[in-house]
Amino acid sequence: MTDLKNLALTASAVLLAVLILATLVRAVIGPRFTDRVIAVNMINTMAVAIIAILSVRLKQDFLVDVALVYALLSFLTVVVMTRLVLVRHWRKCRKTEPTDAKKEAAEHAE
Amino acid sequence: MGILLFGLWVLLSGKLGFEICAIGAIVSVALYILACRTLGYSLSGDLKALKRLGGGVCYLLYLLKEMLWAGLVVMRLIYTKGRNMEPRLIWFHTDLMNDSARAALSDAITLTAGTITVSQEGDLLCVHALDTSLAEGLEHSEFERKLRKLERDV
Amino acid sequence: MLNNILTAAGLIFLVFGVFVFFSAVLGLYRFDYVLNRMHAAAVGDALGIFCILVGVILFHAPTLSSMKALLILVFLWITSPVASHLIAQVETATNPNLKSECKVEKR
């Protein structure tokens, strides 16, 4: 049973690594900026899964904490990137067409 | 809230012992007092929230079931439909009054795969749906009914 | 005995989770617009991480670290809708030809 478990854990970790590579290709060829953000978000989710699997495979409990902190950081990455792009977009709009930008800003203000 | 903080402390410290419990109790009480001062939590508000615990747990279980089911549906769509989707952007009104209830509704909509809340102004929600079949029962959904019941209990 | 049952259930969840992630990545390639691809990513965020972390929880079942894995799960479920909402907002704000990609309806 333990042999089978170890084999399955290793195999799933390797498969997830291959899937991360595939998602990385998507991030490289993605035509738009948001495509890349989505791919990076997905890669982070899969990395959390891999770290959780490794914590079972290597019998190291602290790796679960590492996964928790990684999840925190990945959320922060996405928030900072999208906020940056939105603020720059609003600023550009305001420079070109002030009324339109104001309307749009009011639309997106929460 | 204080009990939750204490649980988090014990969970993150990794082992149970008298010392850890004592320090954790002191720290969580101090944090709770700080939260009451600055963030607007209060003991009476927490007790009121405790009364809605049963309904809240029921709602969360329903959300879990719905989420897993929606995930399976979207997986089937990935394999069967591929490129010929009919994505929709839908504006609709919700009749929830409370701001937190509206936030919970849009959270639930986003968490079920296949529908994503794009923006929300007042009681107007903008939702992107992957396919027309997923956009059918969007307004007057089960989530909204359950949340309205929770809202009325306040 | 109980340990064996837990391990078997965990293995089933793990394999299913890897399958869910595989189909999410496949959806990332098969869909053609950004907003559609986001739904595939949401499947991986919600269902895939649920299956894999439930597997991990069942593997180290009676210890405190399984509770920590549950904490990761709750945390990811709180944050992933916020992240996808922000991405959707950026996409609708910056995409110039949104109208051709999906129909807009008012109810």
Image (spheres, coloured by chain):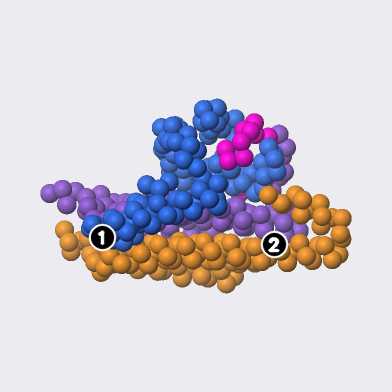
Question: In the rendering, which numbered label is found on residue C79?
Answer: none
Amino acid on which disc 1 is placed: Glu
Q: Residue at x 55, y 66 (%)?
A: A77
Tell me the distance, in whole angstroms, between the alpha carbons under discs 2 and 1: 48 Å
Q: Secondary structure at mark 1?
A: helix
Would you identify the image quadrant in which residue A67 lies? bottom left
Q: Position of residue B53 (x, y in %)?
A: 42, 35
| Residues at marks 2 and 1 touching, judged by CB atoms closer than 8 Å | no
In the image, taking residue B10 as reference, residue B43 lies left or right, namely right
Residue wearing tag 1 = B19
Q: Colour of chain A?
A: orange
Q: Colour of chain B?
A: blue
Residue wearing tag 2 = A86
Amino acid on which disc 2 is placed: Leu
- Choose between B130 and A55: the one closer to the eye: A55
In the rendered view of the protein, which quadrant contains the C terminus of chain C? Answer: top right
Q: Position of residue B144 (x, y in %)?
A: 56, 32
Reply above or below: B41 against C17: above
Q: Residue at x 50, y 51 (%)?
A: B35
Residue C61 can be seen, yes or no: yes
Q: Residue at x 59, y 47 (%)?
A: B116
Q: Secondary structure at mark 2?
A: helix
Label 1: chain letter:
B
Q: Colour of chain C?
A: purple
* Magenta stretch, residue numbers: B84-101
Q: Is residue B2 magenta?
A: no
Q: Is residue B97 magenta?
A: yes
Residue C31 can be seen, yes or no: no
